[in-house]
Amino acid sequence: MKPTISGSRGIIKWGLALTALGLAAMVIVYVLALVYTPFEVRQGAAQKIFYVHVPAAWSAMMAFTIVGLVSILYLWLRDERLDAFAASSAEVGLVFSVIMLTTGPIWGKPIWGTWWTWDARLTLTLILFLLFLGYMTLRSAIHDPAERARFSAVVGIMGMVLVPFIHLSVYLFRTLHPKPIVLKASAPSLPPVMLRTLLLGFLAASVLYLGFVVLRYGLARHAVAERDEEN
Amino acid sequence: MPENTSYMIAAYVVAAVVYLLYGGSLLTKGLRALRKDR
């Protein structure tokens, strides 16, 4: 289905509103985490890195899972909108991954005594990041839209398959990385005041993911609509 | 100041810079697209 200028303008407006809302929610998370949430006894201030690292990791994994699901739909329906949405989600996933992969080592240095260790969780996460960098490179290297969409859908699905392994890697292998404290079968093992800040962090990162993706998708559709109109 | 404060500040600054750079770039492009069509 061909995009129209007015249709893409509507998507951009939604994206702008959601992005602004997500950024405002993130400011609230910063204030709550830095001012109102108490310090953890053993880790001190480093523990507060958790409130930016974990929500960013959540959004990155959500983004890459959505790329895979939307790519499966693309291979089935061959709708170019699905390809554009998958590409938007992959780009946004990379942005959240950059935050996850930089804030993690900043926490690791004072707590583990090293910036990086090649354990299963960290290594698989880095591989996922590199795989989606490859996904973006592949997209820019292929000019035929149908071929680009088909090839990148396959890479996107392979990336999605890694996500559950990354979540379970702390159970399957001996790793330094802490085990999940919220996304697990039993109740969250966190004091209520810390849990509240973390849950708000998840909400802010999710709204921000949605805002970024909708805006990025709207801009991509707008560019196609403009090009079609010129031709 | 509690222990490891500098690491905490570094992590929060890095995350804020990434969010603002990417979010700011998208917001600018979105507003520019809307303004251009007006």
Image (cartoon, coloured by chain):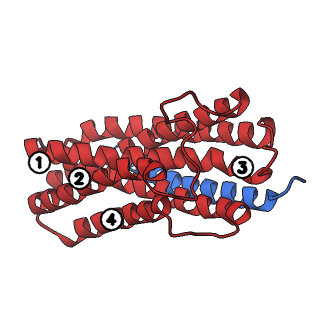
- The residue mark sitting in front, 1 or 3, is 3
Q: Quadrant of the C terminus of chain A?
A: bottom left
- The residue mark sitting in front, 4 or 3, is 3
The reply to whether label 2 and label 1 mark residues of one chain is yes
Q: Secondary structure at mark 4?
A: helix
Crowd tier of the residue under label 3, counting other residues whose Cα lies within 10 Å: few below 14, some 14–19, many 20 or above: some
Amino acid found under the numbered disc labelled 4 = Leu
Q: Residue A214 appears at what percent x and percent y?
A: 36, 41
Q: Quadrant of residue A190?
A: top right
Q: Secondary structure at mark 3?
A: helix
The reply to whether label 1 and label 4 mark residues of one chain is yes
Q: Residue A200 appears at what percent x and percent y?
A: 60, 32
Does residue A164 show up?
A: yes
**Pointer 4 chain:** A
Which tag, 2 or 1, sits closer to the chain's start?
Answer: 1
Q: Secondary structure at mark 1?
A: helix
What residue lies at 33% left-to-right and 65% top-to-bottom?
Answer: A131
**Pointer 1 chain:** A
The reply to whether label 4 and label 2 mark residues of one chain is yes
The reply to whether label 3 and label 2 mark residues of one chain is yes
Amino acid found under the numbered disc labelled 3 = Gln
Q: CA distance from mark 4 to mark 2?
A: 11 Å
What residue lies at 67% left-to-right and 36% top-to-bottom?
Answer: A28
Q: Secondary structure at mark 2?
A: helix
Q: Which mark is residue A75?
A: 1
| Residue identifier under label 2 | A157
